[in-house]
Image (cartoon, rainbow, N blue to C red):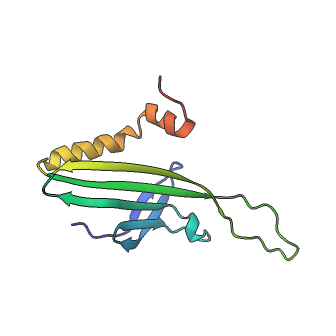
Amino acid sequence: MAAISNLLINDGVPAAHTFSPYQSVPPAWADTVANLAASLQATIKILGMKRDVKAGLMKFTIEVQIPVGEVITGSNSSGYSAAPKQAFVLKSQTTFFLPLRSTSAQRKDLRSFTSNIVGNPVFTALVDNLEIPY
């Protein structure tokens, strides 16, 4: 079993972000950006980890959330500006269904396909520009 530790992940710029663990059950990490409210930090979680020997399956979901804050305009006469509130959240979930009979090489292929598909031009156009494939 891998120990929970910091994750270093690039964004779309690309700029590296360090996600620090903030809980171990379920495993969860937060992007600790200075001067940004905790409620507006991006998070990564591994949800629903279940090894079902009877069904011969291991299942879990990786969830990424990026909260976006409201834009703050102006301040009061004392120069005070309220902390931004959450406007909306971008979220992705990827669920893995791994038969216990599968080999490490087969699971590696699934992970690689899943990782690489989101970099494919069809999918980048869908996510980045909301362009539906035809």
In the picture as drawn, the residue positioned furthest to the front comes out as: 54
Q: Residue at x 56, y 36 (%)?
A: 129
Q: Position of residue 21 (x, y in %)?
A: 40, 71
In the displayed structure image, the side of residue 125 where residue 53 appears, left or right: left
Quarter assignment of residue 52: bottom left
- Quarter the N terminus occupies: bottom left
In the picture as drawn, the residue positioned furthest to the top comes out as: 134
Quarter assignment of residue 61: bottom left
In the picture as drawn, the residue positioned furthest to the bottom comes out as: 78
- Up the image or down, 39 lies above or below 104; here it is below
- Up the image or down, 125 lies above or below 106; here it is above
Q: Position of residue 121 (x, y in %)?
A: 45, 32
Q: Residue at x 30, y 40 (%)?
A: 113
Q: Position of residue 18 (x, y in %)?
A: 45, 65
Q: Which residue is nearer to you in this view: 59 or 11?
A: 59
- Up the image or down, 113 lies above or below 73; here it is above
In the displayed structure image, the side of residue 64 where residue 49 appears, left or right: left
In the displayed structure image, the side of residue 56 where residue 97 appears, left or right: right
Q: Residue at x 68, y 58 (%)?
A: 70
In the displayed structure image, the side of residue 74 where residue 102 appears, left or right: left
Q: Position of residue 16 (x, y in %)?
A: 48, 58
Q: Which residue is nearer to you in this view: 108 or 68?
A: 68
Q: Which residue is nearer to you in this view: 25 or 6?
A: 25
Q: Residue at x 29, y 44 (%)?
A: 112
